[in-house]
């Protein structure tokens, strides 16, 4: 595969009518031909913690980025988060002020999806809800050029099932970034049953340019990282629910006893309790095993709107200067 700088050349396929003697044959014929796209412009759908992080690393890698969300207010909040994170990177001498300014200039707010018509790769990073994602794809697909790649940042939902709802299952792939995106090196790359080799290789090349390490996962519920991580978090919540330990004790036990950088309940708050619940539901329903049953206490917190850091309350209350346990 030939590589163009600064992007990557992707070959794909579509059907074209063969006009040679259609009367004699009685039908029009089709043939596959290859389309090439140089990845220069990235679209990111969703400007929350994950979407803004993806836009951040793409812009620093030299890509033009269109950042979209359901309102301009949310997009501006995402841009402010990116600006603040890059400022901290400058303060730590991880990037220069010139790099920060150039990267911020590459990110453009996108209020209407039509503005992503010229994107070469669009990454959906909306809430972890399959119906929401399907709705986005239904709106987006008619806008995109035929050769564009469509990716999802889902952390648990079937890539094959999502791809089947689009007009380009062969150009659909899972690119699952870890949180926080600028800090975490890993990306899980997940192909659906119809994903073409060229789409996979172009996506791998894109991740390489971002400076990420790729782990290839099969298309099973929650893939690899969350298949292992979320049941551990869910078990920590059960440990709290059953009164085995307090919030502080459980987190201290795993930090000091298992050398985890943060406790599982603190991590759950960081991920978002609604996201944790969604992933556990995917595992429970997809694998039909009771060991993945979401803890009732997790369900209760989500129903209360206590989703962790993003709502200022979860297993810890973040409204004061120092987080304090809520149980």
Image: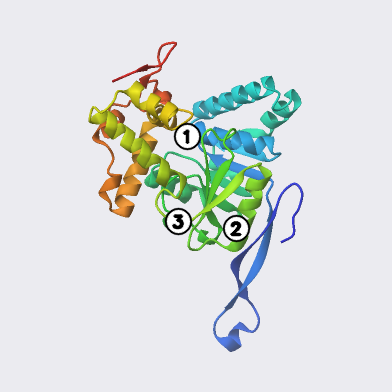
Residue ID for mark 3: 219
Which image quarter is the C terminus in? top left
At mark 3, the secondary structure is loop
Tell me the tag on residue 199. 2
The residue drawn where x is 71% and y is 49% is: 7
Q: Secondary structure at mark 2?
A: helix
Residue highlighted by disc 1? 70
Asked whether disc 1 touches disc 2, contact meaning CB atoms under 8 Å apart, the reply is no
Residue ID at (60%, 36%) = 55
Separation of residues labelled 1 and 2 (CA atoms):
28 Å
- Kindly report which numbered mark, 1 or 2, lies closer to the viewer in this rendering: 2
Of badges 3 and 1, nearer the viewer stands 3
Q: Quadrant of residue 280?
A: top left
Give percent across and percent down for residue 314. 35, 24
Coloring applied to the structure: rainbow
Q: Name, please, the residue furthest toward the top.
A: 321
Q: Residue at x 33, y 33 (%)?
A: 236
Query: Residue 106's x, y, as percent?
Result: 68, 34
- The residue closer to the viewer here, 279 or 260, is 260
Q: Is residue 327 left or right of residue 136?
A: left
Neighbour tally class for label 1: few under 14, some 14-19, many 20 plus, Cα within 10 Å: some
In the image, is 180 to the left or to the right of 284? right
Q: Residue furthest front?
A: 257
Q: Earlier in the sequence, mark 2 or mark 3?
A: 2
Circles 2 and 3 in contact, beta carbons < 8 Å: no
Give how far apart the Cα atoms at labels 2 and 3 are.
16 Å
User: Looking at this rendering, what residue extends furthest in the bottom direction?
Assistant: 24
Where residue 289 is drawn, which disc sits there? none
Q: Using a 10 Å C-alpha cutoff, classify the residue at mark 3 as few (fewer than 14 neighbours), some (14 to 19) or many (20 or more).
A: many
- Measuring from the top left, give residue 232's x and y in whole percent: 37, 39
Residue 311 lies, in percent from the top left, at: 39, 23
């Amino acid at each position: 595969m030939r590589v163009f700088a600064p992007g990557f050349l992707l070959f794909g396929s579509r059907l074209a009518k063969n006009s040679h003697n259609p009367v004699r044959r009685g039908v029009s014929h089709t043939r596959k031909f290859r389309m090439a796209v140089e990845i220069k412009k990235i679209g990111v759908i969703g400007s929350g913690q994950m979407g803004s992080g993806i836009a951040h690393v793409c812009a620093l890698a030299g890509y033009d980025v269109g950042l979209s969300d359901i309102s301009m207010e949310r997009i501006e909040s995402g841009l402010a988060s990116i600006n603040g994170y890059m400022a901290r990177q400058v303060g730590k001498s991880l990037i220069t002020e010139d790099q920060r300014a150039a990267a911020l200039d590459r990110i453009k707010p996108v209020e209407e999806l039509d503005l992503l018509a010229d994107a070469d790769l669009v990454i959906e990073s909306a809430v972890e809800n399959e119906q929401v994602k399907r709705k986005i794809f239904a709106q987006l697909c008619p806008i995109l050029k035929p050769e564009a790649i469509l990716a999802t940042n889902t952390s648990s939902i079937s890539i094959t099932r999502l791809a089947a709802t689009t007009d380009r299952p062969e150009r659909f792939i899972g690119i699952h970034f870890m949180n926080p995106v600028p800090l975490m090196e890993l990306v899980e790359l997940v192909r659906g049953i119809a994903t073409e080799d060229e789409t996979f290789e172009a996506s791998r090349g894109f991740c390489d340019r971002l400076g990420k390490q790729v782990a290839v996962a099969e298309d099973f519920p929650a893939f690899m990282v969350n298949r292992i991580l979320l049941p551990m978090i869910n078990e920590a919540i059960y440990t709290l629910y059953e009164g085995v330990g307090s919030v502080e004790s459980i987190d201290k036990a795993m930090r000091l006893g298992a050398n985890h950088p943060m406790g599982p309940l603190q991590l759950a708050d960081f991920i978002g309790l609604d996201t944790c619940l969604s992933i556990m539901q995917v595992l429970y329903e997809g694998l039909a095993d009771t060991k993945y049953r979401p803890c009732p206490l997790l369900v209760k917190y989500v129903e209360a709107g206590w989703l962790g850091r993003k709502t200022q309350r979860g297993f810890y209350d973040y409204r004061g200067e120092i987080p304090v346990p809520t149980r």
